[in-house]
């Protein structure tokens, strides 16, 4: 009768490459979870320049529901995330990424 296998016998049967891959994936998952948790925990201290994660998603949802302050904050974020890219049609880059016409004056 064979000995009973320990709870980590499956780990010992795997190759080294697969073990390293699983460890790497676990580290990425842990970092991603930490990033989202930290984003939710620091929501009150985030400003227009460091919006990320859950706070950014909340502001986007509020902006799409018509909250004017959230529209301004999200529009500002979108303009900054566009960087120095200039549109081909000659607009100075203002409000090109926005979907809300009330925020941008069209020329």
Image (cartoon, rainbow, N blue to C red):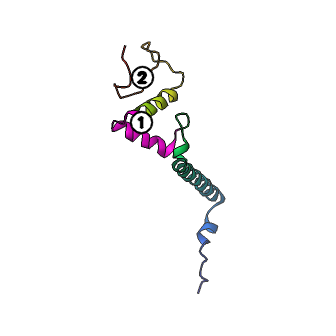
Q: Residues within 10 Å of mark 1 (few under 14, many from 20)?
A: some
State the predominant SS element of the stretch in magenta.
helix
Q: Residue at x 38, y 22 (%)?
A: 104
Q: Residue at x 54, y 21 (%)?
A: 84
- The x and y percentages for residue 22 are 59, 57
Q: Looking at the image, is 11 positioned above or below residue 61?
A: below
Nearer to the camera, 89 or 72? 72
Q: Looking at the image, is 70 positioned above or below residue 53?
A: above
Is 62 colored magenta in this rendering?
yes
Highlighted range, magenta: 51-70
Which residue is denoted by mark 1 in the rendering?
70
Q: Residue 96 shows which numbered tag?
A: 2
- Quadrant of the frame with the C terminus: top left
- Quadrant of the frame with the N terminus: bottom right
Q: Looking at the image, is 54 positioned above or below residue 71?
A: below
- The x and y percentages for residue 23 are 62, 57
Q: In which quadrant of the rendered view does residue 97 lie? A: top left
Q: Residue at x 43, y 30 (%)?
A: 72
Q: In which quadrant of the rendered view does residue 62 lie? A: top left
Is 38 colored magenta in this rendering?
no
């Amino acid at each position: 009768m064979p000995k009973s296998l320990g709870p980590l016998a499956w780990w010992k049967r795997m190759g080294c490459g697969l073990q390293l891959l699983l460890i790497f994936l676990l580290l990425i998952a842990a970092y991603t979870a930490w990033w989202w948790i930290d984003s939710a925990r620091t929501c009150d201290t985030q400003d227009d320049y460091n919006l990320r994660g859950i706070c950014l998603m909340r502001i986007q949802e509020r902006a799409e529901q018509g909250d004017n302050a959230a529209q301004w904050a999200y529009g500002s974020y979108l303009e900054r995330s566009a960087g120095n890219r200039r549109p081909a049609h000659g607009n100075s880059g203002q409000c090109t990424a926005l979907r809300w016409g009330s925020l941008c004056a069209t020329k």
